[in-house]
Amino acid sequence: MIKYVILILFFSGSLSSVAADTTHNSVNSDIKHPEYQKVWNCYTASDAQARKKQVTEGILPYMVFEGETKPVSVETRMSMSKTPAFSVAVIHQGKLDWSEAWGKLQNDGSNADCGSLFQAGSLAKPFTLLAALRMKAAGLVDFDQDIETYFSSYRLPEGQQSKANPITLRNLLSHTAGIVRGGYAGYAKSEQMPTDEQIVRGEAPSNSRKVEVVNEPGASLAYSGGGYTLIEIALKDELNKPFELIMRDWLLDPVGMKQADFTVPLPISSHPHTARGHQIDGGIVAGGWNNYPEQAAAGLWATARDLAMFLLEMHKGYHGKSNVFTQASIEEILATPIANHAYGFRLINDGNNQVFITHYGGTVGYRAGITMNLRTGNGAVFLANSDNGANLGEEFFSAVSRAYEWPVFREKVIKRVKLSPEVLQSLTGTYIFPAQGWKVSVVNQQDSLRFVFPAGNRLPLTMIPIQGSEYQFAHETGVIARFFDEGNDLKIHLFGQTGKRQQ
């Protein structure tokens, strides 16, 4: 087996914990333990209290300033990041160790609990992958057959595909089909939703670009939501069923995910226990959330427990102990990684025979993440109803890593340096990023700089001068900025892009 570990790529009064907690007398031996059926309650194994406390009271930012940064509670970080609700689960040695939820479904709304639904965004993709692998094992689909053989309602436009090198389920699922990159913005509740065929054709009322094969299939990795919408059409045409029923039959029910749902729009009966999405400034998304008719790519609603059960079943499949996923199916996912990715999961090898898989999701107002060491059965999941939730989720993974002694997801320690007021003032101004259309204002703020972004883009960042290059600054969330002279121009490198100060 190839060796892997995860690669992380991420993003007032404190709220009180409101989830009901159920502590049992013995560690669960299986996820289908009767107590798990109490889906509205959270769960804590009898020996997990100390580990749980270490995590929930030990949250650190991604960047830790040496000798300065102190751990705080989950609730404190939620308040600081304007995240109304946060739901998590931690898996230890192949069993659910504990789950918890904090906060409100919306500001001044009902309490969140472990039965609260969140949009899980791109976590729909690994769910779709595992359902397709089950269909493959049952002989219903062939991953290497021309995708056109499964279509009855659609035909791909001519592109870089050919009869000798067609688009297949395998390269669509692994993001190697050469399909145009990109995700989906969703549709407000008041907006008409397009059909799948209108989406891939780029026809009104679709708000996404046409799906085309712009690169040779199999030649490179390009993360594509459009590719998964093609899968959605193919499976619906082949099985002659709505996609939400396909996923119910082939994944959700077999794994026992009682609340996870691909139905779009979300049934009204689920609305009372659904977390509303929130924007960067803390304001609620209009209507509570956007709809995503692109179900295979972004249409999943789930609880943290649902996500934990999914990972636990993959862990059992990896060890040949699952009645849902064959060992061959899990091995197939890991067999041929490309650029530290395997069928959408993010991977990296640290040489310690860790087999971690990780995937993140994000829709307007929501962020989500899952991670699992398939070998050891250690993992964690998070769901947040805020555009700021990715950073909070990363901090949660880091706290779990410290408490459970994982080799990954650790914070980065940096050292503050002091720059004179004159140097700080010399770096202020408005910086233009012409290729991206950004305009970032840099303002002197005592011993630091304050970066102010366009409204709605992200919250202002207080950037601290750090040890390294002479004019390098960092934010606790991991954002790094570097100023440098180029001829007569002062430039800044930020988010992997370069901007120039206006004269």
Image (tube, rainbow, N blue to C red):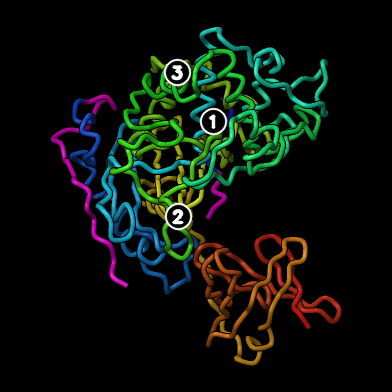
Location of mark 3 (residue): 250
Amino acid, disc 1: Ala
Q: Is residue 252 above or below residue 181?
A: above
Location of mark 1 (residue): 296
Q: Secondary structure at mark 3?
A: helix
Amino acid, disc 3: Trp
Point out the tag, 3 or 1, that comes first from the N-terminus: 3
In 3D space, how far apart are the residues under numbered discs 2 and 1 (Cα atoms)? Answer: 22 Å
Residue at position x 23%, y 41% in the image: 42
Amino acid, disc 2: Val
Residue at position x 63%, y 86% in the image: 424
Q: Nearer the viewer, residue 108 or 442?
A: 108
In 3D space, how far apart are the residues under numbered discs 2 and 3 (Cα atoms)? Answer: 32 Å
Q: Where, by quadrant of the figure, is residue 118 drawn?
A: top left
Point out the tag, 2 or 3, that comes first from the N-terminus: 3
Residue at position x 38%, y 53% in the image: 399
Residue span colored magenta: 7-33
